[in-house]
């Protein structure tokens, strides 16, 4: 710090003095970075500003310069090219004014704003020509000595006494590494032609092709027309044209003469003789150049280089770095401002001691150093990441920042696997972080090669690089997750997570209570026996033999009613089991016994409970669109679940034709859940004793049906196919009602019970061990499901909007109306044809919803004209409270 402070002490107002001058008529030279000056203009050398013109007419002399045009080429980043302003001949006093932003760089001085990095591939083509000299110096000296004859401007220290006109330009080129030698030879040819003016250089198609390979060409000049060209040959032609046309030349240098301090209107402190210590001045300039260049490079990287490298990724990290840059710039600007103010004061001749009382710190303050180091570190990390993204793109590997997927601390491994794979099972995912890549680079490189090998073995496999660097979820080792095992011709659909690969820093959270439930949706046509199957399945799991079931108390999950044939006369007995349930209508044949969806929960393993959802059967005869209505009821009901483990299709084993609605049923299932729900299908056959516990003729019909779908590989295999006989359960219920059977029937039902118990346990193992949860908003995603969610929001939103308008009107009365949703006592629908009761609340009359309970015994078809059904049958009504 002391050395820089010392440099400031030794800065003199003009920077260059003539030892010959004894009368304070001192000449100094300034490159004409401001083109507004003319002979007789006042100049403030403290701040390098052109002021107004002298108030008298000056007699000017115009002469031609005899100096030749100079053209020089500089190569790369060297000691000579580190200071761009010095290359073009700008004096150090003016350079300091530019670096400290005392004066805005225009004209050729604009090269200080050159954005690209100067390196070994950079070339500088410098052109300088003095053409004519305009002067009135002798006349001005006489005027200055007789200062009473004019009015002096307030802050002027000098007057422009002479202007040198000409061409001043520098062309900065960025060369391609593989064409440097050829372009360097071309630049030397151009220099030779301009310096000697021997002949006009011809640009052949080969030369033009070489010029087109130059990465960038930027021209800075005192002649604005030259700065518009971006091709080397165009710049050469334009300079060749104007070198002899002096009318196109512009101000190149100003020769200034000082105003003597003896003028009564002039500050007596304008000429302060301070010895110039160039070592300290150079040190100060080097400091300012370094800070300016550093800030320029940081901005260039943040605004241009990084966005191109990152290709739209890591926007949050990039924006954070830009914010850090703005904070750093604030400290940088304040640092420059302190130096600028102190320098101007010293130039104005104030005592040197003021430097010790300022707030400036000419060494980079610690705050600037720390912020700069942090920003550079972050930018370097993003540059490395950008190069990695480019490498991944070249290798056709998708980059994924897992933060964008919502992965965070607290997620378990299975959930992360589900999020990463989504519904794409043909995928391999490379999980890593920047730290792991740095510390285990050899392992990272090996596993990266393995990813490419996976692509070679399966060209259709998608590869993903999952970056955990910015996630709060802790990854402690590099892993590759593979979604499927490859087989001949195709791959299996279920994803597989490599065990012991990802370990969390914190212990996994306790399982949600929702995971204790295994949710199974039961579907089947009317009359197939879904309700009976649920009862039978619960009892098969509880009692291993029919004898145990007889001596114990049978499980009643759903009340059932059925006809059974007894004795040799084939008499029929109506057997009812369990308490009556309004949801089960046993009185109308042809229509579904189950009226609405209802879930039944019972324990199937320790800590695991099965929630089986009984549904209305399809093939219902009540109306043509009853099956469609039932599907809407089903989707609305399961929408309240967090997950679904499986869908069980209940069928009879020996049918000759499938129900026509079955095709529509599967289509709607795929539309609502997505095509991967196929891996969660299971097929259960009732009354399978007649087909020796096989699917019978129904299986080939199902295979033919599945082949007709665009979605292929719907599994129908031994592992997801189960055969039961519900007759043995009906026999058990009949015994409870004291009906008598012969010994042959008893033995046959006992064997059937044993076989059904075996199948039930296999089914239990399948749903508890083979089926993973199909989670809502993760695997469970579709347009139809989104439409359902939107439809469910419409009524509450409209009611809320309407009530907000009411409350706006009621605000002045200091009262309000509150809407509250309550569950209806029974499943109900809103009737729009019945008269609705109106109730007055404050100044408003509100029509209450008129709810009809869903009928059990009346045909839906008979009331279709009176009821209008929405896509969701509402189970809620709105209460209004004051």
Image: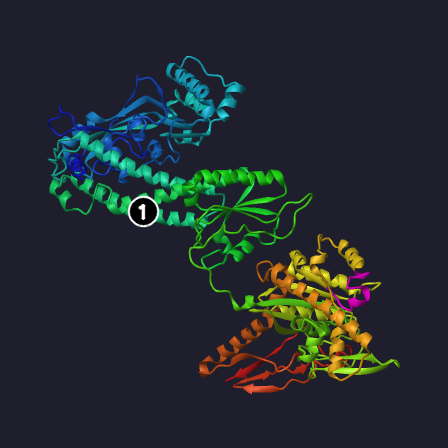
Question: Magenta residues, as a range?
Answer: 684-698
The x and y percentages for residue 799 are 57, 75
**Residue drawn at (14%, 44%) of the image:** 356
In the structure shown, which secondary structural element does the residue marked by tag 1 occupy?
helix
Please give left or right for residue 209 compared with residue 281 in the image. right
Reply yes or no: does residue 879 show up in magenta: no
The x and y percentages for residue 463 are 56, 44
- Disc 1 marks which residue? 328
**Residue drawn at (63%, 41%) of the image:** 458
Give whichever of 34, 689 is nearer the camera.
Answer: 689
Which quadrant of the rendered structure holds the N terminus? top left
The x and y percentages for residue 364 are 24, 42
Position of 440 relative to 699 (above/below):
above
Please give left or right for residue 434 compared with residue 748 in the image. left
Circle 1: is it few (<14), some (14-19), or many (20+) Cα within 10 Å?
some
Does the image show residue 769? yes
The x and y percentages for residue 296 are 35, 39
């Amino acid at each position: 710090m002391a050395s820089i402070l010392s440099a400031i002490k030794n800065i003199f107002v003009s920077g260059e003095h003539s030892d010959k001058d004894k009368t304070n008529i001192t000449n100094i030279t300034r490159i004409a970075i401001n083109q507004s000056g003319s002979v007789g203009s006042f100049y403030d050398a403290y701040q390098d500003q052109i002021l107004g013109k002298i108030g008298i007419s000056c007699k000017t002399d115009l002469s031609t310069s005899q100096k030749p045009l100079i053209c020089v080429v500089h190569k790369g980043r060297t000691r000579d090219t580190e200071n761009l302003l010095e290359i073009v001949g700008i004096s150090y006093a003016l350079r300091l004014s530019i670096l400290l932003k005392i004066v805005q760089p225009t004209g050729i001085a604009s090269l200080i704003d050159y954005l690209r990095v100067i390196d070994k591939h950079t070339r500088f083509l410098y052109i300088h020509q003095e053409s004519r000299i305009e002067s009135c110096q002798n006349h001005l000296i006489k005027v200055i000595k007789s200062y009473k004859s004019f009015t002096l401007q307030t802050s002027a220290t000098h007057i422009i006494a002479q202007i040198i006109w000409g061409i001043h330009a520098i062309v900065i080129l960025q060369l391609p590494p593989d064409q440097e030698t050829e372009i360097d030879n071309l630049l030397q040819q151009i220099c030779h032609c301009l310096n000697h003016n021997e002949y006009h250089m011809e640009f052949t198609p080969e030369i033009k092709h070489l010029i087109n390979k130059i990465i960038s060409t930027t021209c800075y000049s005192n002649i604005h027309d030259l700065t518009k060209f971006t091709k080397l040959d165009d710049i050469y032609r334009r300079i060749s044209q104007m070198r002899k046309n002096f009318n196109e030349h512009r101000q190149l240098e100003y020769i200034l003469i000082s105003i003597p301090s003896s003028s009564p209107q002039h500050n007596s402190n304008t000429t302060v003789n301070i010895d110039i210590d160039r070592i300290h001045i150079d040190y100060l300039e080097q400091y300012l150049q370094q800070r300016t260049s550093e800030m320029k490079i940081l901005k260039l990287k943040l605004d241009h280089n990084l966005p191109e490298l990152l290709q739209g990724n890591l926007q949050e990290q990039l924006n954070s770095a830009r914010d850090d840059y703005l904070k750093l710039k604030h400290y940088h600007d304040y640092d420059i401002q302190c130096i600028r103010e102190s320098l101007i004061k010293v130039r104005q001749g104030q005592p040197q001691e003021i430097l010790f009382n300022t707030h400036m710190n000419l060494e980079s303050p610690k705050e600037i150093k720390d912020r700069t180091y942090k920003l550079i570190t972050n930018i370097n990390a993003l540059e490395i990441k950008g190069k990695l993204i480019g490498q991944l793109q070249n290798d056709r590997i998708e980059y994924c920042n897992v933060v964008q997927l919502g992965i965070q601390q607290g997620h378990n491994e299975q959930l992360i696997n589900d999020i990463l794979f989504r519904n794409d099972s043909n995928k391999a995912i490379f999980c890593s972080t920047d730290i792991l890549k740095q510390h285990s680079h050899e392992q990272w490189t090996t596993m990266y090669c393995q990813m490419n090998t996976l692509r070679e073995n399966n060209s259709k496999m998608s590869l993903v690089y999952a970056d955990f660097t910015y996630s709060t979820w802790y990854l402690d080792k590099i892993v590759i997750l593979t979604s499927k095992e490859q087989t001949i011709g195709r791959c299996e659909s279920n994803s597989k997570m490599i065990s012991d690969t990802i370990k969390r820093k914190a212990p996994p959270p306790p399982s949600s209570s929702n995971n204790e439930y295994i949710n199974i949706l039961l579907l089947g046509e009317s009359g197939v026996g879904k309700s009976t199957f649920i009862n039978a399945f619960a009892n098969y799991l509880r009692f291993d033999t029919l004898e145990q079931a007889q001596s114990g108390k049978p499980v009643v999950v759903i009340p059932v009613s059925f006809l059974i044939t007894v004795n040799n006369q084939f008499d029929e007995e109506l057997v009812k089991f369990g308490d009556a349930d309004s949801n089960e209508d046993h009185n109308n044949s042809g229509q579904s016994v189950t009226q609405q969806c209802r879930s039944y929960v019972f324990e199937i393993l320790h800590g695991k409970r099965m929630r089986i959802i009984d549904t209305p059967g399809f093939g219902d005869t009540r109306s043509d669109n009853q099956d469609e209505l039932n599907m809407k009821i089903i989707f609305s009901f399961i929408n309240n679940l967090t997950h679904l483990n499986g869908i069980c299709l209940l069928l009879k084993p020996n049918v000759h034709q499938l129900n026509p609605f079955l095709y529509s049923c599967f289509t709607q299932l795929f539309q609502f859940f997505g095509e991967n729900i196929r891996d969660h299908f299971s097929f259960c056959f009732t009354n399978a004793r007649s087909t020796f516990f096989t699917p019978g003729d129904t299986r080939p019909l199902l295979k033919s049906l599945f082949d007709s779908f665009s979605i292929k590989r719907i599994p129908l295999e031994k592992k997801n196919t189960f055969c039961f006989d519900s007759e043995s359960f009906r026999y058990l219920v009949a015994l409870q009602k004291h009906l008598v059977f012969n010994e042959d029937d008893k033995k046959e039902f006992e064997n059937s019970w044993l076989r059904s118990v075996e199948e039930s346990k296999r089914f239990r193992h399948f749903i508890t061990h083979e089926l993973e949860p199909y989670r809502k908003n993760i695997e469970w995603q579709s347009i139809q499901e989104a439409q359902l969610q939107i439809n469910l929001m419409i009524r509450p939103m409209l009611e809320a909007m309407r009530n907000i308008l009411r409350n706006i009107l009621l605000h002045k009365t200091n009262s309000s109306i509150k809407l509250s949703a309550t569950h209806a006592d029974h499943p109900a629908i809103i009737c729009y044809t019945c008269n609705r009761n109106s109730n007055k609340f404050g100044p408003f009359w509100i029509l209450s919803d008129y709810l009809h309970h869903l009928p059990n015994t009346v045909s839906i078809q008979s009331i279709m004209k009176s009821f209008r059904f929405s896509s969701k049958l509402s189970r809620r009504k709105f209460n209004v409270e004051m």
